[in-house]
Amino acid sequence: MTKELFLFTTYIFVLTLAISYFLIPLLRKIAKKYDIIDKPNSRKIHKYPTPLLGGIAIWGSFTSVIILHLIIVIVFKDYIKEKSHFSPALAFYANNATYIVKEVLVFIICGTLIMLIGLLDDIKKITIARRIILETLVAFIIIFSGFQPELFFLPRSVACIVTILWIVGIINAINLLDGANGLACGVSIISATLLSIVMFLGNQPLLGMLLVILVASTLGFFKFNFPKASIFMGSAGSMFLGYVLSVVTILATFMIHEVSSHFALLIPIAILGIPLYDTFSVIAIRLFQRKSVVIADQNHLIHRLLYKGHKVESAVLYIFLFTAFSGGTAIFLLNASTMRCIVILISILTIYGCLFLFERFIPKRSADKEYRLHLPNV
């Protein structure tokens, strides 16, 4: 990364962070005024009615910063290309941005649609079946707009199906993970940070920049959501986070020519492993208990840790650590030989094995009185 690119990335980060941070108080007032509130019930952890709409700050800061600078790049393209003002590398990336205006607009529009679907769910509570149908339609738009993953070893039709499943799956995995203060938010920040490192190491700075913007927009909200939440991101926020993470990984190239093995394609799965682990484990538990897989319960990873007696903040931090360890280890798949990749994958599987043992076999302690849960023995 050149000095100019680093400084520009820092500027983008700070600007996005500030916009997100200062949007929160306004959105909190709007949520209270129009009664867009998440009320406690027997399934939820929080005790007091809490405003939603925090996700709009994440979406708003992310979207506004991208659109603003895309306009600047288009309008001042010739000025930026002057080497006397900017480095050749920065001018090259800025010039390239002018050729992907259509793709960026599709990306923003589809992200806005996902946010609106989540917002509708926050306000009126739509069924999961309808939500998945709407998410699938957005995924089709993404595919037909030319967004294709690097699955060259699969037939095009199969690759399209995998792409749809990945987008819809990650959107819902992040949404389902959002069961405690700061949980989905923090996991998304860690995952986006790790993916941005992969993008910059893989010489994909534009995608890296998108992820940096996502980290900043989410960090601006995080201060108000952990440990004591004064506002929730709601489905609007969690679904938008899942959308950006899923689509950016589709656009990314994880194979470095003559350096990476095909194992590098597993990097996004490993980095987003905790949301996927939570989703698939919940589905398995519900099937084992002969319950509907679409009916909400308290069988998520966070609930299982709370059932063992951990405080909410401690359980959330444990999940953050597992996310960082597994995702951080996956970065080394980028330029490792086949044998090293096998060792790395075994290490990642060992981390998840430790997580399984940690949540299943640690001695049960007395639950925190403030967050005592009555959960099934899972």
Image (spheres, rainbow, N blue to C red):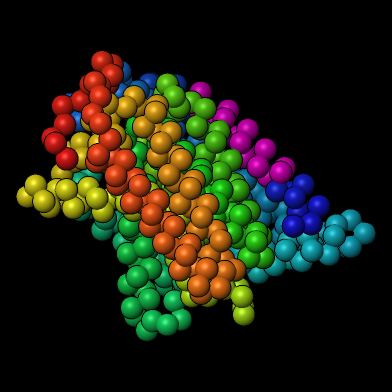
Judged left or right of residue 89, residue 353 is left
Residue at 56% across / 66% down in the picture?
334
Quarter of the image for residue 23 reads top right
| Viewer-closest of 263 and 119 | 263
Judged by its main secondary structure, the magenta piece is: helix
Left or right: where does residue 123 sit relative to residue 243? left
**Image quarter in which the N terminus is found:** bottom right
Magenta stretch bounds: 10-26
Q: Residue at x 33, y 78 (%)?
A: 158
Q: Position of residue 277 (x, y in %)?
A: 32, 51
The answer to whether residue 230 is above or below residue 278 is: above
List x then y, in percent, for residue 219.
Answer: 54, 36
* Nearest to the observer: residue 267 or residue 181: 267
| Residue 20 lies in the magenta-colored region | yes
Quadrant of the image containing the C terminus: top left
Q: Is residue 236 above or below residue 141?
A: above
Q: Residue furthest right?
A: 84
Q: Residue at x 21, y 40 (%)?
A: 299
Specify the farthest residue to the left.
290
Q: Is residue 248 magenta?
A: no
Q: Nearer the viewer, residue 302 or 85?
A: 302
The image quadrant that residue 350 belongs to is: bottom left
In this view, 242 is above or below 236: below
Q: Residue at x 58, y 28 (%)?
A: 22
Query: What is the residue that sits farthest to the top in this orientation?
Result: 369
Name the spot of residue 71 as percent of width and height, x first: 68, 54
Tell how many labels: 0
Residue 178 seen: yes
